[in-house]
Image (tube, helix red, strand yellow):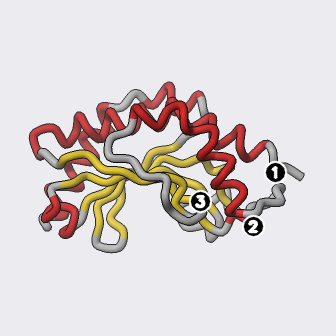
Amino acid sequence: MDYHFYQQKFQEALDQISQKEFNELGLKLSVEVILESVVLKIYKPEWSSDAQSPLDASSRIFFSIWIHDKTIEEGRLYYNIHALKLRELKGYTIQSRRFAEDFRSRFTEYQKDWDNLSLKFGPLTLMQGWRELKTENLQRDIIKLSYSFLEISPIIDETLSHFKI
């Protein structure tokens, strides 16, 4: 995989996204290389156990769009929402399985808007799907997925509010 090429494409997509709407909801965006993948992550520092280092916190919720060698072979661009070690999230008493169920029940009305989506995962992956990988449309697809997440991100806040101490 040409990391430089894909990292540049992801960064160019990020540069085209209006930060204003994301900032208004407290969302941050970051392009990085992790586990041999190029990834765009969208997250809120408040959704982590370490607001100073939310991308590395042991407990965190984030949306990601990623690509790596296998996804390229499959011709797919993947996306998902992860909810890691929620029991450690400060200010909440969360059972991960219950959180996942609550999130998914709220998310169902938006499900039709997401390509090749599955909710049939354990509590660490709230949802996951993919779009057909077309290099000429990569930036457009990343931008579209990012704005789709922007629309549903309040569901995470709503779900978290039910577990606040």
Q: Residue 76 appears at what percent x and percent y?
A: 21, 54
Above or below, 42 against 2 in this view is: above
**Left or right: 81, with 113 as reference point:** right
Q: Secondary structure at mark 2?
A: helix
Q: CA–CA distance between discs 1 and 3?
A: 14 Å
**Left or right: 67, with 73 as reference point:** right
Q: Residue 105 appears at what percent x and percent y?
A: 63, 42
Residue 123 shows in this picture = yes
Numbered circle sitting on residue 83: 3
Q: CA–CA distance between discs 1 and 2?
A: 10 Å
Numbered circle sitting on residue 87: 2
Q: Secondary structure at mark 3?
A: strand
Residue corresponding to mark 1: 163
Please name whichever residue, 19 or 122, is drawn nearer the observer in this view of the structure. Answer: 122
Label 1 sits on what residue type? Answer: Phe
Pointer 1 and pointer 3: residues touching (CB < 8 Å)?
A: no
